[in-house]
Amino acid sequence: MNSQTLPTTGAEAATHLLQLIIDLDPQLSIEDIFRVGNLLTMHADPTRLNQANYVKDVWLELSLRLQAAADQQAAVSEELENLASTDPQKFKPDQVWLLIKAIKVLSQTLEFYSK
């Protein structure tokens, strides 16, 4: 299927999208190909998922957002590990704030994957 041919069935559209993803990064594992496809179908305009440039742009935007979320999650996880060794009855206000921030980060991550 060339880039000018529009898919006419759900199966053709899915196959076309997966091929676009593979063309963008042939090194992706099969699991990552399907993850990217799933994220694209949740966060992109479904009527444009047959357009290679659009898929690339959305994928790059999603990749940046995912990396930012992963970095934020890693930082919060490290802070939570340190907090875990503290007696909860002796928590200070900034430690309680850390717990609230961790909940917010987790919520944002879950929202991203379940949109």
Image (tube, rainbow, N blue to C red):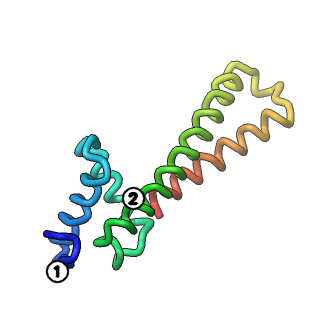
- Percent of width and height locating residue 85: 69, 19
Q: As rendered, which of 21 and 92 lies closer to the eye?
A: 21
Q: Is 15 left, or right, of 25 in this rendering?
A: left
- Percent of width and height locating residue 49: 33, 71
Spot the residue most to the top: 85
- Percent of width and height locating residue 62: 48, 56
- Give the residue number, with chain letter if any, for mark 1: 8
Q: As rendered, which of 25 and 47 lies closer to the eye?
A: 25
Is label 2 in a helix, a strand or a loop?
helix
Q: As rendered, which of 88 and 29 lies closer to the eye?
A: 29
Q: Is 104 left, or right, of 115 in this rendering?
A: right
Q: Is 78 left, or right, of 32 in this rendering?
A: right
Is label 1 in a helix, a strand or a loop?
loop
Identity of the residue drawn at 47% across and 50% down = 63
Q: Rounded to the nearest whole Å, what is the CA distance between mark 2 and mark 1? A: 21 Å
Q: Amino acid at mark 1?
A: Thr
Q: Quadrant of the N terminus?
A: bottom left
Circle 2 residues within 10 Å: few <14, some 14–19, many ≥20: some
The mark found on residue 39 in the picture is 2
Identity of the residue drawn at 34% across and 59% down = 38
Spot the residue most to the left: 1
Q: Is residue 48 above or below residue 87?
A: below
Q: Earlier in the sequence, mark 2 or mark 1?
A: 1
Q: Amino acid at mark 2?
A: Leu
Q: Is residue 39 above or below residue 30?
A: below
